[in-house]
Amino acid sequence: MKADRPKQFLELLGKPVLQWDLELLLSMERLERIVLVIADEYRDLPFLQPFLSDPRLALALPGAERQNSVENGLAAVGDACTLVAIHDAARPLVTIDAIERCFADAAQHGAAVLAVPCKPTIKESADGEFVSRTLDRSKLWDVQTPQILRPQMLRDGFANANANQLAVTDDVSVVELMGEPVKLTVGEYTNLKLTTPEDMIIAETILRDRGETH
Ligand SMILES: C[C@](O)(CO)[C@H](O)COP(=O)(O)OP(=O)(O)OC[C@H]1O[C@@H](n2ccc(N)nc2=O)[C@H](O)[C@@H]1O
């Protein structure tokens, strides 16, 4: 991102990315608990203070890789929890409608992930210089978050991934590795992952288009 702080603290229309996330998620009454995975050094930020006093918010420490951060967050999830949703702070444009549909699919199938059909043609390269092959676009899905599943499924998946030293870049991968089904919930192209500076400009345009004026 070429920025002076982690991208979740950069501002969109004058409001930190993480604040957009938290306001959206805390507006969903069905979420009984929200575990915010955040390093100690950022917990004093003024915008966070009202959220930290919300009884539904719990905190966990990040790990070296996203996978480790998710494991730490999962440890703060109680035994009574029936479904856990893992969301990237870097995806503040997700909508309640998409999250609700993903919950419905996860309740029915055990695990579900928001995803959109892949727009570009994707080629694979073994050496990073020449094309090895072209993948069949009609079968490709660009997966997002939230990724929603039964907590025990995620715990078993992490145990299996750790035992076999398998690194994953998303959460439902650990379920796939155990051969369990993962439902694709058709999401929205606007749920982009803020990754490079131009994503901030696109995100602000989308927010303005939605009538957000913060
Ligand atoms: C899950 C997917 O969104 C599905 O497309 C991606 O695979 C995530 O890919 P990624 O490269 O991990 O994306 P990033 O933007 O770097 O990180 C996604 C989210 O994971 C969090 N993250 C990342 C690294 C880490 N050690 N702990 C974390 O909690 C970041 O705060 C961010 O909100």
Image (spheres, grey):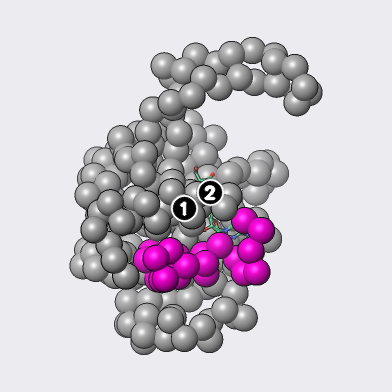
> Does dot 2 land on a helix, a strand or a loop?
helix
Seen in the image, is 170 located left or right of residue 153? right
Left or right position of 108 against 190: left
Residue that badge 1 annotates: 201
Q: CA distance from mark 1 to mark 2?
A: 5 Å
* Circles 1 and 2 in contact, beta carbons < 8 Å: yes
The residue beneath circle 2 is 198
In the image, residue 204 lies in the stretch drawn in magenta: no
Q: Determine which quarter of the picture holds residue 72.
A: bottom right
On the image, the x and y values in percent for residue 41 come to: 62, 81
Task: Name the one closer to the observer, 158 or 19.
Answer: 19
Q: Give the residues in magenta.
A: 1-21
The answer to whether residue 146 is seen in the rendering is no
Residue at 44 percent of width and 38 percent of height: 143
> Percent from the top left, x then y, of residue 103?
27, 49
Pinpoint residue 169: horizontal percent, then vertical percent. 58, 44
The quarter of the picture where residue 211 lies is: bottom left
Q: Nearer the viewer, residue 48 or 87?
A: 48
Give amino acid for label 1: Ile
Position of residue 99 relative to residue 58, above or below, is: above
The residue positioned 65% from the left and 69% from the top of the image is 4
Q: Amino acid at mark 2?
A: Glu
User: Looking at the figure, which quarter contains the N terminus?
Assistant: bottom right
Residue depicted at x 58% and y 49%: 196
When asked about the image quadrant of residue 79, the answer is: bottom left
